[in-house]
Amino acid sequence: MPIQVTCRHCLKRFQVSDKFAGKTGPCPNCKKPIEIPKADEQVVIHAPTDGAPKDSKGVSVLKPIKRKETDVTKSGLLISIGSIVAVFGFALVFRFTGQDGAAPFWAQLVGLILLAPPLVWSGYTFLYDQEREPYVGPELRNRVLICSALFAVIWVVYAFVPAYVFELDKPSEMSWTVFGITLCVMIVLGALASAGTFELEFFNGVIHAGLYFIVIVLLALTSGVALAGKPSQNDRLLDPLALRSTPQMHSVTIADVTPSCLTPPCTS
């Protein structure tokens, strides 16, 4: 019966005849001397034993636990796309039928809230960690609602912080540069909310939150809402171009409107 030998110098494994058991000889690979173990000194590795209960045929009666996947279902995808299309459709209607060519505030608020759950759910199904057990059922629903509420609340940053810092009457009076910085801050806060709610990695959380906030910005532009770059009343008064375009009021004297017939004749 051949003996399994492993060279302690080069770790080469090979077999030798049992007649060389207990003897010393050169390794066929590195040529260094090694000692051939005796037959009773060999290490035998046995296959792991299965202690699970078996039936009469020796087959395990235990069934493996199947992992539940959270993939994008066709119905869920259609609901998400339908919700987004419907909200954008209403935004266009309000833009062309509402006052000042923009959707009213209550319609903006409703769109802000209605778009959150489908976008949050769709983003999670694409971005969740494949090595972790995904959230399903009521737990997934509750986390989607919590994250959606947090995303909507983060818009408070846009509504109040820049206006307070720069003493603006309305958030739309901020410059586009300030709006871009504010949007980045909102996405970072949203990423933290996603990471805390769904245990996503921070980079995936940035994508998750960015999807929602960018869609909301597109919704605002579609509905005719000015998010930034709108001059304030003081800026209009101080703008020389605005003053130049304002019609000038000329003073009129009594002499300008006095009929010529009432003017006394000139005497030489």
Image (cartoon, rainbow, N blue to C red):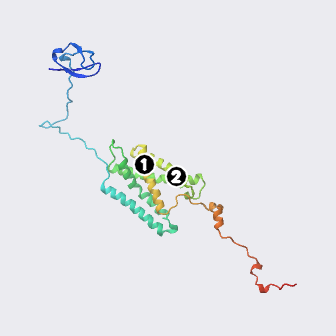
Q: Quadrant of the C terminus?
A: bottom right
Residue 196 visible (yes or no) = no
Furthest-right residue in view?
A: 268
Horizontal and vertical percent position of residue 266: 84, 84
Residue at which label 1 appears: 207
Horizontal and vertical percent position of residue 208: 41, 49
Quadrant of the rendered structure where residue 75 is? bottom left
Residue in the foreground of this view, choosing between 222 and 131:
222
Where 40 falls versus 233 (above or below)?
Answer: above
Is 136 on the left-hand or right-hand side of 193? left
Where 164 falls versus 14 (above or below)?
Answer: below
Horizontal and vertical percent position of residue 171: 55, 57
The answer for how far apart the CA atoms under marks 1 and 2 are is 16 Å
The local secondary structure at tag 2 comes to helix
Q: How many marks?
A: 2
The residue located at (63%, 60%) in the rendering is 235
Residue at which label 2 appears: 180
Is 48 on the left-hand or right-hand side of 113? left
Say whether marks 1 and 2 touch (CB < 8 Å).
Answer: no
Residue 41 visible (yes or no) = yes
Furthest-top residue in view?
A: 23
Kind of residue indicated by mark 1? Ile
Is 229 on the left-hand or right-hand side of 44? right
The local secondary structure at tag 1 comes to helix
Kind of residue indicated by mark 2? Gly
Horizontal and vertical percent position of residue 177: 55, 52
The residue located at (26%, 22%) in the rendering is 12
Quadrant of the rendered structure where residue 25 is? top left
Is disc 2 surrounded by few (<14), some (14 to 19) or many (20+) residues within 10 Å?
Answer: few
> Could you tell which of marks 1 and 2 lies nearer the N-terminus?
2
